[in-house]
Image (tube, grey):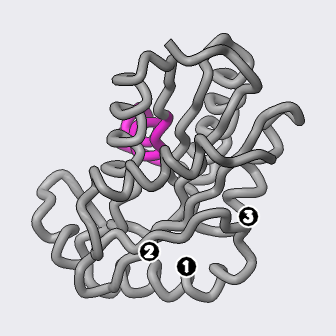
Amino acid sequence: MTAPGRPRLVVIVGPIAAGKSTLAGEVGRRLRERGESVAVVGLDTVAEMAQPTVDWDWVHEVHAQLVGAWLATAVRTVVAEGPSTPAELDLLMRCVPGDVAVLTVVLVTRYAIALERALQDSARGLSRDPDFLRADHDRFERGRRHLPCDLALDGAVATPSVLAEHVVDTLDSYRR
């Protein structure tokens, strides 16, 4: 069991279909295998709670509050995935206590790969539309330079397991 310490937050930021949910789940799994307490908080999971009508502003607010609530518990590490813009990340960070060590991971992938992933996922709705997905990826790229980035990863160059290993290794050595 890992010794208790300062709470940690891993925020996985990226455009739609970059692999944020998959990476978050894999990071959580790896940390749990080491005996750590982990909460994985996915934006899409929060959105599913509001079906069939989703107000994305509300979903981002609830997601941020949920991340903050988990950070107030004895859970050692919270993995939050979902933000894709500086404003969404700012909203999330307003709910993070000051004593939390934060590692921001920016996960990208090329549009063509994201489209292929989205089209293969029958559970996706609007994000399967090529024009919607292109607009999201373009919006992400415009805002990317305004995002904090402690670790940048390309979701298309390695398996989720390898990417998660890199995140966990960085988290272990990260002091902020």
Q: Residue at x 57, y 59 (%)?
A: 105
Q: Earlier in the sequence, mark 2 or mark 1?
A: 2
Q: Which residues are magenta?
A: 41-54
Q: Secondary structure at mark 3?
A: helix
Kindly identify the amino acid type of the residue bearing the numbered disc 3.
Ala
Query: Which mark is drawn over residue 76?
Result: none
Left or right, 1 with respect to 120, comes to right
**Residue 45 in magenta?**
yes
Disc on res. 108: 2
Which amino acid lies under the numbered mark 2 shown in the image of this protein? Answer: Val
Q: Nearer the viewer, mark 2 or mark 1?
A: 2
Image vertical order of residue 152 relative to residue 110, above or below: above
- Front-most of 5 and 89? 5
Residue 32, image quadrant: top left
> In the rendered image, is residue 58 in sight?
no
Question: Which residue bears the numbered disc 1?
Answer: 140
Which residue is tagged 3? 87
Towards the viewer: 47 or 116: 116
Magenta span includes 31? no
Q: Position of residue 6 (x, y in %)?
A: 76, 25
Q: Residue at x 54, y 70 (%)?
A: 152
Do labels 2 and 3 touch, CB within 8 Å?
no
Q: Please tell me which residue is depicted at 31% across the width and 68% down the height of the picture.
A: 127
Give how far across and how far down residue 160 sits, in percent: 28, 55
Residue depicted at x 23% and y 71%: 128
